[in-house]
Image (tube, rainbow, N blue to C red):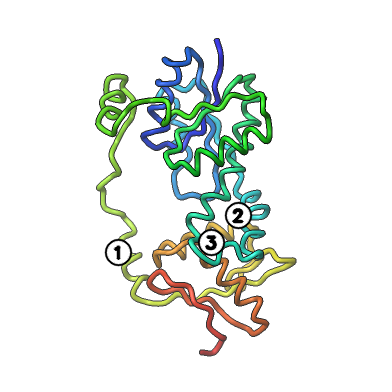
Amino acid sequence: MDRIVLAYSGGPSSSVAIPWLREQQQAEVVTVSVDLGQHESLDGIRARALASGAVRAHVLDRRDEFAREYLLPAIESGALDSDAPAIVAALSRPLIAKALVELAHIEGATAVAHAATGPQDRERLAAAVAALDPTLRVIDATVDWTFDAQGMAEYARERGIPFAAPSSTPDPLAAIKADAATHPIFVHLDFRGGVPVKINGIEMDLVELMASLETIADAQATSGAAVLRAAYNAKQSGVPADVKIFNGVCEVVTRGN
């Protein structure tokens, strides 16, 4: 039986793609989820993939590689000066494609698949896979199937696939975040060779530092990448400065102000 490696996010589309690929392609489906520092529990994602019919579910930790080889160079080049979330998402696609190709070779798969919904995401993934291994077939599930949202939910229900709307359960950290959002947070990063190594005087490895930035940024309705960009701009100023984060805005402020 043929085998397909599916880029798996844990969302409804990628969950439905597992049985759809099995039925339409008469193939085993192996999933790969790439940890880039997102907030989702990847253990939960692995369990969801297996419950949806995957024969194996791989989770790859690429947080350090993503930060060091993709995110930091983009910040240093000024590529994140606008629309940071969209650019960060675009930066992740070559790394996801790389994981797809690596797992396809390990698993002996003849094709890779994804359930990306945006046309640019689909094009980036297809182009990146083709550049790495033009012999691999790329299956774009969301283009090939004919589901609307209701049809997808029904398809999942008929096959016993975990398919849930975004949870309406209250955020257990909502009160803490609400309190944090009423007060600005000040962050200072120390860099070594262009890589952040300390946050407010505490030395951390890059993965740990980025996780801390995401936690701080999330309380202020922004992203760790946005804080890192502002910190890099502060470093470039040559004047001791901090990043003030308040109401989703990152601002460089001279120390003492």
Q: Amino acid at mark 3?
A: Ala
Q: Are marks 3 and 1 in contact (CB under 8 Å)?
A: no
Spatial CA distance of label 2 from label 1 is: 27 Å
Residue located beneath label 2 in the image: 207
Precedes in sequence: disc 2 or disc 3: 2
Where is residue 76 drawn, in percent x and y? 66, 65
- For mark 3, give the secondary structure: helix
Q: Amino acid at mark 1?
A: Ala
Is label 3 or label 1 in front? 3
- Badge 2 local density, few (<14 within 10 Å), some, or many (20+)? some
Which residue is farthest top?
A: 1
Residue located beneath label 1 in the image: 175
For residue 231, above or below residue 25 = below
Residue located beneath label 3 in the image: 225
Precedes in sequence: disc 3 or disc 1: 1
Looking at the rendered structure, which numbered label has been put on residue 24? none
Query: Residue at left 74%, top 66%?
Result: 193
Which quadrant does the N terminus fall into? top right
Spatial CA distance of label 2 from label 3 is: 13 Å
Where is residue 197 drawn, in percent x and y? 66, 65
Where is residue 25 drawn, in percent x and y? 48, 15
Query: Residue at left 61%, top 66%?
Result: 78
- Badge 3 local density, few (<14 within 10 Å), some, or many (20+)? many
- Nearest the camera: 224 or 208? 224
Q: Amino acid at mark 2?
A: Val
- For mark 1, give the secondary structure: helix
- Badge 1 local density, few (<14 within 10 Å), some, or many (20+)? few
For residue 64, above or below residue 155 = below
Where is residue 52 drawn, in percent x and y? 40, 25
